[in-house]
Image (spheres, rainbow, N blue to C red):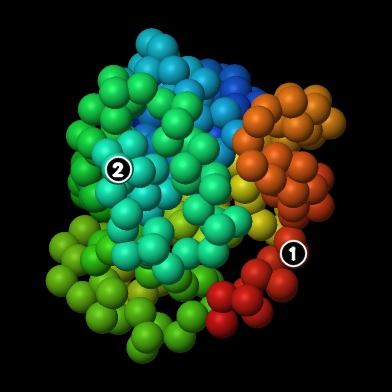
Amino acid sequence: MNDVPRMRIAALYDIHGNLPALEAVLEEIRRHRVNQILPGGDVLPGPMPRECLELLQSLDLPVQYIMGNGDREVLARMRGVETGWYKNAREEWRAPIDWTAQQLSSEHASLIAGWPATLTINIESLDDVLFCHATPRNDTDIFTRLTPEERLAPMFSGVGQSTVVCGHTHMQFDRMIGKVRVVNAGSVGMPFGRTGADWLLLGTDVQLRHTDYDLAGAAERIRGTAYPGAAEFVERYLLNTPSEEQMLKAYS
């Protein structure tokens, strides 16, 4: 028992309304004696947004959220605001934001509005860990395990924590940027590189975790929603995810 750290956090990034994936990850988490859940942004948009929020809120564990760009855009539409991104986005990008906003209540809006952009938590052997959605400076920066360090240095300048956990690009990695260890949690609901769900377990160290689940059953449930592009979501993010090679090339 003495080798079990007092703080064990499961970081679940980029859920994107994929309820079956979230359910599978939470089932696995219960076997790891986790005592806190941290959704790291982009719980939204997605095909089962209300159900995902309500499941997270019903847990008998503390849940601390941070805001992602998707959550931020959905909240803006719930408030009737057209952001700069929304005004310039293609219709097929706007539709999921609009639909998701219509599924949520004013209570959901109040919940989301309280999510911070970053959060620092002390996890014993890891010391202070900074959680952000993309980088410490904003929720939209894109970088990968291959991005040259000199490009990333300005994004992480001034970071006092030794470990930063991020997401946004939907691909797991664990790398150093200067003296800062940067770990990408990957995506629970829309992973790139392989099917299933990716997340992190933080305790004595940071573990890149992967959970397989019933993709055929999940596909049927998601196709049964009214989510715009539900069929494409199933094909692209559940059954035939883009390869890591494809996404590294796209992000470069």
Q: Secondary structure at mark 1?
A: loop
Residue labelled with disc 2: 80
Question: How far separated are the C-alphas under marks 2 and 1?
Answer: 37 Å
In the picture, residue 183 is in which quadrant?
A: bottom left
Q: Amino acid at mark 2?
A: Gly
Q: What residue do we see at 36% from left, 22% from top? A: 105
Name the one closer to the observer, 130 or 42. Answer: 42
| 124 relative to 26 in the view: left or right | left
- Per the image, label 2 sits on a secondary structure element best described as loop
In front here: 223 or 56?
Answer: 223
Residue 12 visible in the snapshot = no
Task: Please state which of residues 221 and 252 is positioned toward the viewer in this rendering.
Answer: 221
Task: Specify the label residue 157 is tagged with.
Answer: none
125 over 91 or under it: above or below: above
Q: Amino acid at mark 1?
A: Ser
Q: Position of residue 232 (x, y in %)?
A: 74, 48
